[in-house]
Every structure is written in structure tokens, then in C-alpha cells.
């Protein structure tokens, strides 16, 4: 017979080995990045040019509003880059019937739908400006990822087809960089938000009931993105207020990462290594459930906010079909557009997410995180990367808020009621 002490040792090692294997499965369930779109602008064949899908200005035939040039910064870093032509800038007006009506856009249609439930999605590009100003709106760059998109791109002269439903697609998330000079903190240098306009599905704007504006997206509820109201989630727009991002001397690299429950934005000088990415801001994007208060609590826990209701027209978007880049002015250049994914390669994710009622949020966590389940939680266990049990808490609640300030940055496994979730502590 096995003595009681030996049995304890066996049970301990068995549990530790199981948790270690579970952690190993988490860590090895990701493949290498898969590039979906990459455009270095060595040709003009990669993108869909919306300016060529209409007649604008004094042109009598389809004409591009863009040009590709070789642009160097003060460090000698040189890229082929896209920008507006002089004629394109001249007819940039969205109020003029012969203007471009904001169709100064290039689109990239994905070869298949990208799902954040399955993939981590990364959208990135480089940008540099020749001139900045106090306001920053004139030469702003807008990037939107679309959850609806017409196959093959929008049809010809769709700007005038306001009777059609979303002929230019529908935005899921979009972010904009303003060409604003450095005015110190508490000025709006960039912003990011979900959807847009007065539709839960997100919408591009229509000018005075006359024509579509495929490059314009108002904040959800019609909020002006460059507003002075509180940040998301107390309103529908998250603003970046710390310092100037647009640069006239160096190429800058902008990267947005769409996780299952968050959209995060990073910036660095292009010449720097990726390890120098500066975290700008993020949107916690809880999946929609019947318990609205649980969603609000998740938002407040992640953002340190005091929202009492969901942001207007809030929607959790999944299933992305294209991106759109819009340049609202001349003397701004974009290079190296890239969309990539990190895909899972094991079936563990379906076990963790699809057949699992256990939730852990915010994730990643900094100071606190909440463990939530549909049924009463008897106890919560936290395991380290090596399978060591860090914490064991007995509870009789459906939700418990835990402090992770003393945890070393890294990956942990949370166990409750025989279910598991991964937690990243930062």
C-alpha cells in the first residue's frame, strides 16, 4: 500500500504536472505571425483606390488622386510612400459636388474574414508629415477596419447612391492621428473608437443627405472625435492626450492590435526596434451578454472609470473584411501597410473559450482582475508558469475581485470550478 504521505506527494506532483502541461499548451498553441496584407508601395497594384471609382474635379475619365514617391526622413530612412497629388488636394472638398467627397482613400480587402475570436489581428503602417499645425485635423490620417465590405470593393460612383445601404462597408474600429504640433499634455493628438455614427453597426457619414463620405466617421452617437468630454467608456471615444505623434523629421510607426477583448494602440519611431513600442491607449471591448452591468463593471475595472451605462451604440465587433486608410490633406505620406494575424493551432482554445463559462477580466491585468462565472465559485486557484500554486481562495460568489499587484509580470492560469483561463499580468 502507498502511505498517506506518499499519496500526498503523488497528488501534488500530478496536479503540478497537469497545470504545467496546460500552461505549455497555452504557450505552444500559437503559430508564427501570418501576413495577410503587405504593401511597400513598390507598385500601385495592392490597394483599391476609391478616387478611381468616381469622376471628380475637371477630369473626364477615372483618375487617381494619389501618387507614390520616394520619401526620406532626417535619419536617411527611405521608403516608397503614398500621398495625395496636387490635383487630389485641390479637389479634396467634401462639400463640393465635383470634389472627392472624402474618397481620398485606399482600401485593402482581406482574402478571407479575420475573426478576433480565433486570431490576434495586427494593423500597422509608417507615416511622416511635411507640415503640422495647431488644429491637426487638416492632415489627419484615419485607419478603419471594416466588418462589412462589398466584395471587390465599392462600385463606381457610389458616393451618390445614398439610397443604398452601406455601399462603402461599415467600420468596426477606427483610429486617427492628428497632424497637431506639440502643445503639451491635455491636447488631443489622436483618438480611437468603435463603430461610428448613429448605428450600432457603425456607418460612414452622408453629407447633408446628398452623398456618402467614405472617409468620414463620426464618433458613436455623432460625437466629434476631437471633443473635450470624458474618455471612453464614459463617452464613446478614447482620446490620446499625452504628446505629439505626427512627426516631420522622422518616420513614425503606428500599430493597433485587436485581441479577443481589447483593442490596443502602440507607437514608436520607425528606426527603433519593436521592443521600443510605446503603449498609447486601448479600448476594453467586452463581448455582449445579457448582464449589462457585468459589461459595465468590466469596462470600469479595465479603464479605472465610473461609467454607469454602456457607451452609446456600443457593439462588440468580430469578423473583419478590409481596412481603409484616409488622408485628409496633402504633405502626409504613408508607407509599409501591413495586416497580420497570430493564429492558434490547437483545439485547446475551443475548450477554454467555447465550452467555458469562466471569465477573467481585464486581461491583461495591471492591479486587479475579476473572476466571474455563471454558477457560484467555490474556490479560485492561481498557478505560475512552472505549475506552482500561487494562491488558493475559498469563496461562495459568482464574481470575485482579486489583487494582482504583487504578482510578477507574466502568464498565469486561473482555475475555478474545474475550468481554466489564462491571465496575463503586466
Image (tube, rainbow, N blue to C red):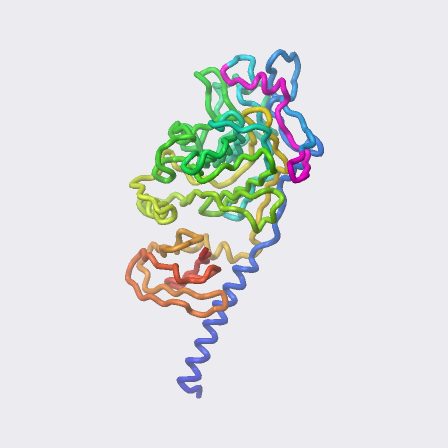
Is 415 or 46 nearer to us in this picture? 46
Q: Residue at x 59, y 24 (%)?
A: 330
- The residue range painted magenta reads 72-95
Is 122 or 171 nearer to us in this picture? 122
Q: Is residue 386 above or below residue 350?
A: below
Instruction: Report if residue 368 lies within the magenta region.
Output: no
Quarter placement of the N terminus: bottom left
Residue 52 appears at what percent x and percent y?
A: 63, 21
Give residue 288's quadrant in the image. top left
In the displayed structure image, the side of residue 419 where residue 394 appears, left or right: left
Q: Is residue 140 above or below residue 294?
A: above
Q: Is residue 109 visible?
A: no
Quarter placement of the C terminus: bottom left
Q: Is residue 70 visible?
A: yes
Count of numbered marks: 0
Is 299 or 351 nearer to us in this picture? 299
Residue 356 appears at what percent x and percent y?
A: 42, 55
Instruction: Report if residue 77 lies within the magenta region.
Output: yes
Q: Residue at x 37, y 55 (%)?
A: 368
Residue 90 appears at what percent x and percent y?
A: 58, 17
Q: Is residue 239 above or below residue 377?
A: above
In the displayed structure image, the side of residue 64 where residue 403 appears, left or right: left
Is 362 or 396 nearer to us in this picture? 362
Residue 63 appears at what percent x and percent y?
A: 65, 19
Amino acid at each position: 500500500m502507498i502511505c498517506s504521505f506518499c499519496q500526498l506527494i503523488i497528488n501534488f506532483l500530478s496536479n503540478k504536472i497537469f497545470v504545467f502541461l496546460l500552461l505549455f499548451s497555452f504557450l505552444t498553441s500559437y503559430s508564427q505571425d501570418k501576413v495577410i496584407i503587405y504593401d511597400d508601395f513598390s507598385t500601385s497594384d495592392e490597394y483599391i483606390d476609391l478616387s478611381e471609382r468616381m469622376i471628380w474635379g475637371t477630369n473626364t475619365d477615372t483618375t487617381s488622386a494619389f501618387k507614390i514617391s520616394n520619401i526620406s526622413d532626417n535619419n536617411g530612412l527611405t521608403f516608397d510612400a503614398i500621398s495625395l497629388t496636387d490635383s487630389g488636394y485641390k479637389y479634396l472638398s467634401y462639400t463640393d459636388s465635383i470634389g472627392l467627397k472624402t474618397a481620398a482613400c485606399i482600401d485593402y480587402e482581406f482574402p478571407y474574414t479575420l475573426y478576433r475570436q480565433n486570431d490576434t489581428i495586427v494593423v500597422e503602417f509608417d507615416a511622416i508629415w511635411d507640415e503640422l499645425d495647431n488644429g491637426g485635423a487638416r492632415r489627419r490620417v484615419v485607419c478603419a477596419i471594416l466588418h462589412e465590405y462589398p466584395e471587390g470593393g465599392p462600385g463606381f460612383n457610389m458616393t451618390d447612391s445614398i439610397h443604398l445601404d452601406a455601399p462603402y462597408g461599415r467600420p468596426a474600429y477606427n483610429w486617427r492621428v492628428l497632424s497637431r504640433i506639440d502643445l503639451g499634455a491635455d491636447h488631443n493628438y489622436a483618438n480611437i473608437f468603435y463603430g461610428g455614427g448613429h448605428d450600432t453597426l457603425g456607418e460612414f457619414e452622408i453629407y447633408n443627405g446628398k452623398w456618402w463620405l467614405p472617409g468620414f466617421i463620426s464618433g458613436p452617437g455623432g460625437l466629434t472625435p476631437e471633443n473635450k468630454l470624458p474618455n471612453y467608456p464614459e463617452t464613446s471615444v478614447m482620446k490620446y492626450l499625452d504628446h505629439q505623434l505626427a512627426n516631420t523629421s522622422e518616420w513614425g510607426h503606428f500599430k493597433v492590435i485587436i485581441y479577443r477583448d481589447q483593442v490596443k494602440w502602440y507607437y514608436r519611431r520607425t528606426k527603433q526596434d519593436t521592443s521600443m513600442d510605446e503603449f498609447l491607449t486601448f479600448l476594453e471591448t467586452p463581448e455582449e451578454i445579457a448582464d449589462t452591468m457585468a459589461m459595465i463593471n468590466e469596462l470600469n475595472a479595465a479603464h479605472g472609470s465610473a461609467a454607469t451605462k454602456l457607451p452609446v451604440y456600443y457593439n462588440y465587433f468580430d469578423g473583419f473584411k478590409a481596412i481603409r486608410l484616409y488622408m485628409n490633406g496633402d504633405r502626409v505620406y504613408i508607407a509599409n501597410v501591413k495586416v497580420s494575424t497570430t493564429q492558434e493551432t490547437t483545439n485547446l482554445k475551443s475548450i477554454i473559450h467555447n465550452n467555458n463559462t469562466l471569465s477573467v477580466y481585464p486581461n491583461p491585468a495591471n492591479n486587479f482582475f475579476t473572476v466571474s462565472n455563471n454558477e457560484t465559485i467555490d474556490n479560485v486557484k492561481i498557478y505560475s508558469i512552472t505549475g506552482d500554486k500561487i494562491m488558493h481562495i475559498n469563496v461562495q460568489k459568482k464574481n470575485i475581485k482579486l489583487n494582482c499587484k504583487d504578482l510578477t509580470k507574466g502568464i498565469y492560469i486561473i482555475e475555478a470550478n474545474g475550468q481554466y483561463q489564462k491571465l496575463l499580468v503586466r
